[in-house]
Image (cartoon, grey):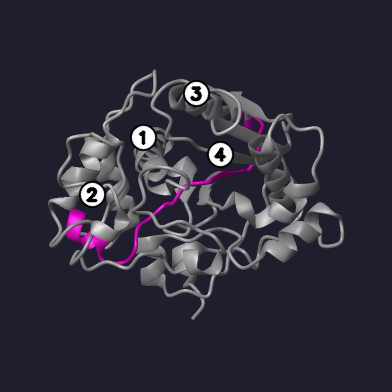
Amino acid sequence: MMCAPETAGAAPRFDRVVVVDWSANSTPKRGADSIWIGTAGAGGGAPENLATRAQAMDMLRLHINAGLAAGARILVAFDIGFGFPRGFAQHLTGQASALAVWDWLARHIIDDVRNRNNRFEVAAGINRKFPGTGPFWGRPSGRDLPDLPEKGTARHGHGLAELRAAEARCSGAHPMWKLYTTGSVGSQSLLGMAHLAGLRAEYGTALAVWPMQRADAPVVLVETYLSLIDAAVRVAQGYACKDAAQVDLLAQALHKADLAPLFAPDAAPDILREEGWILGAGHSAALLAALDGTGAA
């Protein structure tokens, strides 16, 4: 089933693409495994490395404001999850809506200018609202949070799926419930959603979140997955680290590619509204072809 027009809208053409590799680091950090921002199209430049999430959000606002001032249409792609498996949003917020979860997190997450945050405590509190043990798991050893198990195998009876529908299309995708060690997309997403909720409030109707909202606003936020262009990253040269190559190459690919198929996922509207979708899921070949010039729009 194709997504309904009122859910996602037609795929627009973007003048500027910004790709953000987010981080859940609890202290400022630069280099590998920190925050990188890549840009392509109008105003594009070399990848930027930010030490804190506060600095990254300030830089993102600069990109958005510059694009809006120039009359450009802007695609902002974040490498975090925009939603959780079905059932989570309804149980937590009373609404089967990913954006309701964003607003809930914005009210509960604390994340200061030095990256100090309460994500583990918030996740433990969410776990207490669900039956059994879980769904979130993973924490630093010795952290006194009995409602947040260290191992995923310790969970039971919470009643939620491990993966979202979009994640099943992306090889190697980690579950949103994982908060610690390699692939802790859950931690990045909890913090990222809270920050992006603030961005939504700030820009109002100038900004839309796809696929929960139509993609025809001047600024469109989407979820992406950096590994979609891994084949190009493996042979890339001249970058400071893998993260820099990923954001730069994916920004270029999204700017050059025909985005219409990417904006038409074969998922039901209720899944898109509650779980979100990974822009580019199932379309790695098209993005890679756009990079080498054989599939550019």
Please give the range of residues in magenta. 67-92
* Res. 198 mark: 1
Residue count near mark 3 (Cα–Cα under 10 Å), binned few <14, some 14–19, many ≥20: few
Mark 1: which amino acid?
A: Gly
Q: CA distance from mark 3 to mark 2?
A: 34 Å
* Res. 149 mark: 2
Residue 174 rendering spot, x and y as whole percentages: 46, 56
Residue at (24% x, 44% y) in the render: 123
* Residue, disc 3: 58
First in sequence, mark 1 or 4: give its number.
4
Mark 4: which amino acid?
A: Asp
Question: Are the residues at dot 1 and dot 2 in contact (C-beta closer than 8 Å)?
Answer: no
**81 is within the stretch colored magenta:** yes
The answer to whether one can see residue 68 in this image is: no
Mark 4 or 3, which is nearer the eye? 4
**14 is within the stretch colored magenta:** no
Mark 2 or 4, which is nearer the eye? 2
Q: In terms of depth relative to the viewer, which is nearer, 8 or 171?
A: 171
Residue count near mark 1 (Cα–Cα under 10 Å), binned few <14, some 14–19, many ≥20: some
70 lies above or below 81:
above
